[in-house]
């Protein structure tokens, strides 16, 4: 990790098209401006981590959810016990 000290108004250039400008330093916070091409995705790490965690939670299915989905998709297929599922 590269660690730099910058003052308000000073900039960093990353690669060919990303410019990070220090906008304001206030207490324990720093406001940054980021100029980047539209093809470069810029995310706050804590938001990205929260979205990834929510996706993992959403992808986890309990047995009841799996059974409900099976009933919706193929109501005439047997369940894991071999018994046909009831029609709705």
Image (tube, rainbow, N blue to C red):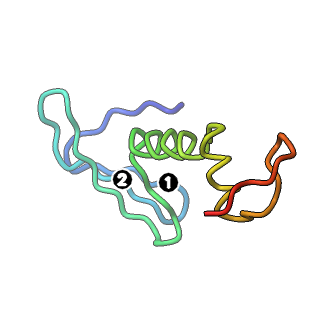
How many numbered discs sit on the rendered protein? 2
Up-down relation of residue 14 to residue 27 (above or below)? below
Q: From the viewer's perspective, is 60 left or right of 13? A: right
- Give the quadrant of residue 87: bottom right
Frontmost residue, 87 versus 74: 87
Frontmost residue, 84 versus 8: 84
Q: How crowded is mark 1: few (under 14 residues within 10 Å), some or many (20 or more)?
A: few
Where in the figure is residue 30, as x and y percent of width and height?
Answer: 23, 38
Q: Which residue is drawn at 66% across and 38% down?
A: 63
Q: Which of marks 1 and 2 is nearer the N terminus?
A: 1
Q: How crowded is mark 2: few (under 14 residues within 10 Å), some or many (20 or more)?
A: some
Where in the figure is residue 73, as x and y percent of width and height?
Answer: 70, 65
Quarter placement of the N terminus: top right
Could you tell me if the residues under marks 1 and 2 are in contact, i.e. CB atoms within 8 Å? yes
Q: Which residue is drawn at 82% across and 53% down?
A: 78
Frontmost residue, 43 versus 34: 43
Q: Residue at x 39, y 33 (%)?
A: 4
Q: Residue at x 54, y 64 (%)?
A: 16
Up-down relation of residue 32 to residue 74 (above or below)? above
Q: Residue 20 carries which label?
A: 2
Q: What element carries label 2?
A: strand
Frontmost residue, 54 versus 48: 54
Instruction: For marks 1 and 2, give the CA distance.
Output: 8 Å
Q: What element carries label 1?
A: strand
- What residue is disc 1 on? 14
């Amino acid at each position: 990790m590269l660690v730099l000290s910058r003052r308000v108004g000073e900039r960093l250039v990353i690669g060919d098209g990303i410019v990070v400008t220090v906008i304001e330093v206030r207490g324990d916070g720093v406001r940054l401006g980021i100029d980047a091409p539209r093809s470069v995705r810029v995310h706050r790490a804590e938001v990205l981590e929260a979205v990834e965690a929510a996706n993992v939670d959403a992808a986890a299915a309990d047995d009841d959810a799996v059974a409900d989905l099976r009933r919706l998709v193929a109501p005439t297929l047997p369940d894991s016990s071999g018994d046909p599922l009831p029609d709705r």
